Image: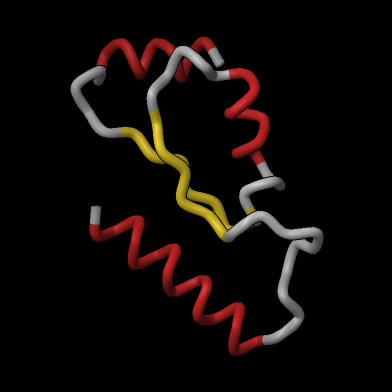
Amino acid sequence: MNQLLALYEKYSAATWFWVQEEPLNMGAASFLQMNMKGINYGIISRSPSAATATGYAKVHKVEQEEIIDTAFSI
């Protein structure tokens, strides 16, 4: 975490985003939300879910494309 804080201080004028394939309530995003309150950042991820995947290839593909498109269009 100290490395992230150092980078945040160095690039404080930048807009920060955490991008993950997992749902919002899984993966590192929930850890960051609890432990990195001193950094202003957005999160790009799947919507919160009880399962890590939808189980449907077509839905997964659409969600994946939304994550990638959002991350690279900001």
Locate residue 52, reporting x and y percent. 75, 62
Q: What scheme was used to colour the molecule?
A: secondary structure
Q: Quadrant of residue 36?
A: top right
Vertical arrangement, residue 1 with respect to residue 50, above or below: above
Q: Quadrant of residue 8?
A: top left
Apparent side of residue 69 relative to residue 24 in the rendered image (left or right): left
Apparent side of residue 11 relative to residue 31 in the rendered image (left or right): left
Vertical arrangement, residue 15 with respect to residue 69, above or below: above
Locate residue 32, reporting x and y percent. 59, 28
As drawn, the residue found furthest toward the bottom would be 58
| Picture residue at 26% right of the left edge, 33% below the top | 15
Apparent side of residue 69 relative to residue 39 in the rendered image (left or right): left
| Picture residue at 47% right of the left edge, 15% below the top | 3
Locate residue 18, reporting x and y percent. 46, 41
Q: Nearer the viewer, residue 20 or 6?
A: 20
Q: Quadrant of residue 11?
A: top left
Locate residue 19, reporting x and y percent. 47, 48
| Picture residue at 76% right of the left edge, 80% below the top | 55
The image shows a total of numbered marks equal to: 0
As drawn, the residue found furthest toward the right would be 50
| Picture residue at 19% right of the left edge, 22% below the top | 13
Which quadrant of the figure contains the N terminus?
top right
Apparent side of residue 16 relative to residue 14 in the rendered image (left or right): right
Vertical arrangement, residue 29 with respect to residue 74, above or below: above
As drawn, the residue found furthest toward the left would be 13
